[in-house]
Amino acid sequence: MSATTSTVAVTIEVNGKARRLEVEARTLLVHLVREQLGLTGTHVGCDTSNCGACTVLLDSLAVKSCTVLAVQADGSTVETVESLAPPEGPLHPIQEGFRQEHGLQCGYCTPGMLMATKSLLADNADPDEDEIREALEGNLCRCTGYEMIVRSIRWAVEHPNGLEDPS
Amino acid sequence: MRVLLNVVHRSAILRKTIEQGDRMSLVGARVIRKEDPNLLTGRGRFVDDLAPTGCLHMAYVRSLEAAALIRGVDLSDALAVDGVVAAYTIDDFAELPPLPSGPEGMDRPVLARERVLFAGEPVAVVVAVSKAIAADAAEAVQVDYESVPVVASIDAALAEGAPLVRPELGTNSPFAMGPDEAMAADVDAALAAAPNTASLRVVNQRCAPSPMEPQGCVADWGPSGLTLWATFQAPHHLRNKLVAYFGIPAHQARVIVGDVGGGFGSKIVFSPEYFLTSAISRKLGQPVKYVQTRSDAMVLTTHGRDQVHDVSVAFDDDGKVLALRLHVVQNVGAHPDATAMGLPVLTTWMASGCYAIPKIAAGFQVCLTNTTPIAAYRGAGRPEAAYMIERVMDLVADRTGLDPAEVRYRNFIQPDQMPYPSVTNEAVVYDAGDYPAALGELQRILEYDALRAEIAENNADPSKPLRGLGLSCWVEIAGFGPNGSLEGFGHLGSWESTSIKIQPDGSAIIAVGSTPQGQGTATTFAQIAADELGIGFDRISVRYGDTETVQQGIGTMGSRGVPVAGEGVKNGAAAIREKAKVIAAHLLEANPDDLEVADDAFHVRGTPTKSITWGEVAWASFQPLEIPEELGAGTLEDSRFQTVPNFSYPSGAYGCVVAIDRATGKITVERYVCIDDCGVVINPLLAEGQVHGGVAQGVAQALFEQMTYDEDGQPLTATLVDYLIPSAADLPSFESGRVVTPTPVNTLGAQGIGESGSVGAPPAVVNAVVDALRAGGADIDHIDMPVTPEKVWSVLRAHTDMGGELS
């Protein structure tokens, strides 16, 4: 018996940079992001696509990157949590909302929550509590009980420029 | 950016100052967290993010059988896989002693030896150059099992003639602790003589703690010693265990805990992988990593709860409880962990709840089964007690026809009875609390009488869902713990270490033995220190989780961070402040008693122009010629091992309103109101977050979660598809209120808040469901958790004309 070794070339734009990579055909997008690109902000929390810790944006849509083969992302753009704020710049309003309203405790589910939120707000710029809860149904958090995540997202809605918002 | 963040801090401080009218204080202020920027930007460092050069990956071969003799293990197909470096069974670790946990005579070898005792138990390991190859090769290992009879539940294990999990013990119930004999006789007499009695059997089901980050570790054992990165709540205990286990000197063993993605008690267990990866790294001379998959985690990470209670209560016609008898059976799984033995102890200790019950006889027995080991899960023994006594109070209300709130008021321990020695055990002396005030505040927010009337009116209309209101007045044990307490049950209490070092620029670094998993320790401890030192919050860092930079520690469990370590930070900071004042006075040519310190400077009271910055004082503290001779260079540091004279007993009152679909049994939590009393609150934002998270886990236990086994011991809920961790869409908004009764146990007045929600939440939900079902005509005293739609539907179907047809 030998392990699968056949590789496939893929070209994926990750966080604004085009990357050409050789991947094993069975490689999941999350493993490409974490292990080949070293972007460890995207986490793995389960193996059944229930927890959403691995959520990234694939062509601007939130996907669970443990359920996407890297080869399926060939020719696509991928955004991970590392893309939300420049290294020395201000936090993205969604990140700032989570900070202001204590939308995270251990922080393990947080990158997935942030990316799912980005997808939600792109679709609905002013979601109410029920819409937020519905939209985050695929992202589990064991620490917060979600109330403060809902408040965090409302903060981001109300401060579209983050802390630099004059309000 | 930084300026803006400071503005936010400042406005929070000002808001608090205006509200309270006292001097500018960070303790009590809604301060946002120091921890967040790393975690929000993907710059957290969790164990799975680490991959040292040359790192190998370990995978377990998990037992498919719940009880079997191992007739043979064939590693050859696995070893033939490209990329596999090694594969081992227990025979390859003959020199390794059993794992350092559990009572005597119930040892657990580091890998299964000759037999497996639960489904999933690791039988062998495979080590490969990648995690994927290790996982593939683990599947190629052939294990020859000879099945033996299984007992997968308490009922099966305690049945007459049941197969024995560990035949060498001669019993499945190897340990029991009865109540005091005289008290037991007293309680029996009281039950026999009482005007009213009632009994319940209450099951507190097995739950999986399920932190979002599964357990993991990376071991790197080189010529200069062992370094182990681990997901753990108590790194020093783990270091000490590794040292003892391998017989190596402590200076050559280092445990590092980085960011940890939740623990909830499950990450204080000495799991086999910490020892195996270390041993394999030593054998192979390369780093070795193991991170659980979720499938691993569901069966290998310890579970919690799993108690059955038989309770009898005696009460008079006025609803006053006269006596209580409780027998607890604690399922400990196949390999009893030390903390598992402590769970029923804590349950029996807390059997009195918030009530002045004059006679209580509470005892327990532990029960072995062919299941995953049980250990601490958020609340650890106290949620079980709160659930039992709060179900009993509703039962008494039902039997006497009194309102559930009224029954509670008639039985409460009163504030003027504090400190209150419980009759359950001499170790239990409630420190502080105002239970009537908490319930009163809950009733005020609920608009209790109007709400009861509204629910009654609603329930009279068959076109509307059934509604019910449940109360939970709870108390728990936190601040683990005074010296000598709980020492038989692992490593849960006693002192905590703190160290504060003033840096040459007047900033400060604090190192603590606490090792958090999301609690916000770096923020709350900096708040406490900032108030004492007069150093700005942004000029204080808090370090933890590394045995090389923190001199000893106990860790984070039992809601002990603030009440024990926080108290040490406060006392250490105050001691440094007084020494710094001597230096400042020397430099200012003033009297130390005339100095006050605030905003990073020392000022002469009444002479605002005469001041010196903290930076100048700190710099001088390292210049022997600039400071009073008796102080010496480097005097501005403090290390201590803080102890506390007693546990603390946080309390509260929770109220829950549920709606039940009469046709389907679907349950909706419409309101959840939490009144907490944890004494003085350091940071209301973080305290509220702790309550929310605990309540969410408690509501989840009440409605959704249960680790289920079939009678062959196969877990039926071993993935997150089957084990129902609620999402945002499944949980309600929480309304919060507060009562503040400062504890005398520490000078902060803080009791701890980490476990409160999970203690108080389940009975509020179940009491609400029972209230609704009884209002609908169901003649039931109790319904077991998790209260699923199916169970509710079955009750409606059996007891009423409700419960729709199955289609």
Image (cartoon, coloured by chain):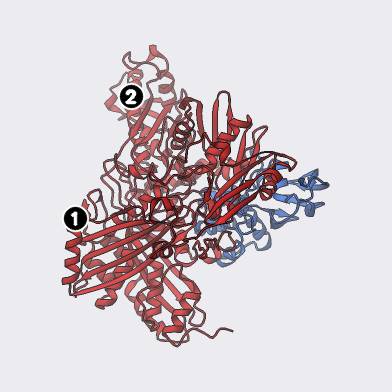
Q: Is residue B627 above or below residue B369?
A: above
In which image quadrant can residue B798 be found?
bottom left
Indicate the amino acid at tag 2.
Answer: Lys
Q: Which mark is residue B417?
A: 1
Q: Position of residue B212 (x, y in %)?
A: 55, 52
For chain B, what colour was chosen? red
Q: Position of residue A95 (x, y in %)?
A: 59, 49
**Disc 2 and disc 1: Cα gap in Å?**
40 Å
Please determine if labels 2 and 1 lie on a single subunit: yes
For label 1, count other residues whose C-alpha is less than 10 Å away and answer few (under 14), some (14-19) or many (20+).
Answer: some
Q: Position of residue B336 (x, y in %)?
A: 42, 50
Residue B194 visible in the snapshot: yes
Q: Is residue B240 above or below residue B710?
A: above
Q: Position of residue B716 (x, y in %)?
A: 55, 63
User: Could you say whether the residue bearing mark 1 is in a helix, strand or loop?
Assistant: helix
Residue tagged 2:
B579
Residue B294 visible in the snapshot: no
Query: Taking B757 as reference, is B439 left or right?
Result: left
Query: Taking B433 as reference, is A3 left or right?
Result: right
Residue at x-position 46% and y-position 27%: B250
Of B508 and A8, the residue lying toward us: A8
Indicate the amino acid at tag 1.
Answer: Gln
Q: Which chain is in blue here?
A: A
